[in-house]
Amino acid sequence: MCTVPWGNVSGWGAVATGRAGQGNPVIPAHPHIFFGSVPGWHEYRGWQEMRPDTTKIARGAGSHKMTSEEARYLVIAEWGTGFCKSPYYWNLSAKEREESQFMMEVFTDLMRIYYHQNPPQWDAEHTQECCVLQYPRKIAAEPEHFLCIVPVLTAFFSYLDEEHLQKNAGAIQRVVRTLDAKIQAAAKDPKAWCLAKQVAMAAIAEDIDLEDKRAVEEFTAQYFKKHPELNPGDNPVMKQILQSLMNRK
């Protein structure tokens, strides 16, 4: 599973030419996996057909109940439009720009799922916990991806603060700057990962093709033979999350 190219939305435009909105979209070279809410696997397909009332969303932060699609649209297509034209975006490294859309999509979902916060309501306290606890717990990606979290989020929230688009953006970016060591520690610690990520990372380490359903099924069965203490058994929630590893297409 790859992240959606920025060109699929009206905004975020990380492209190979180095100019937003033109040329071939840049996608990470390695698959990134988000084990979110049940069934546990999120595919980002682009939202060019979605046109929510983002003016109402931005102004009615305290009362408007966003759908997940509206929240992502606000972050990627609305806020992202200006961000990708700003020095904050272009001062990031090529790798950081490459990772940034997937990162903000997942961050948006995690903040909704675990903290019941839509983008206008994000605050420093819950952002810190999300970055240190939930993001490393739920995202299976190469180590370089996690090194991009602090630079990308710092740049994004600095932009939002400068443009007065999110009331807590200044406080958030100040907190995010301090989190790198904790994020890297959690990203490297299997004890900090959810069960589905543990299985996925073990499969990746064994060069299992995650697009090969049979290979994943066989590996998962062998994994739980070696680690019976981790076997979810009849737990329906865990079984469904693990099944998503094999049925994500």
Image (cartoon, grey):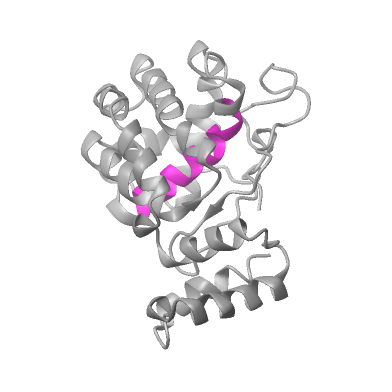
Q: Position of residue 135 (x, y in %)?
A: 40, 47
The answer to whether residue 219 shows anywhere in this view is: yes
Q: To which quarter of the image does residue 12 belong? A: top right
Left/right placement of residue 45 relative to residue 230 reads right
Taking the magenta stretch, the answer to whether it contains residue 171 is no
When the figure is inspected, residue 245 is found, relative to residue 191, above or below; the finding is below
Q: How many marks?
A: 0
Q: Which portion, as a residue range, is magenta?
A: 97-113
Left/right placement of residue 102 relative to residue 61 reads right
Front-most of residues 183 and 243: 183
Q: Residue at x 43, y 55 (%)?
A: 138
Q: Residue at x 53, y 36 (%)?
A: 144
Q: Residue at x 65, y 50 (%)?
A: 45
Q: Position of residue 130 (x, y in %)?
A: 32, 45
Residue furthest bottom as drawn: 234
Front-most of residues 146 and 188: 188
When the figure is inspected, residue 232 is found, relative to residue 70, above or below; the finding is below
Residue furthest left as drawn: 125
The answer to whether residue 61 shows anywhere in this view is: no
Q: Position of residue 210 (x, y in %)?
A: 67, 62
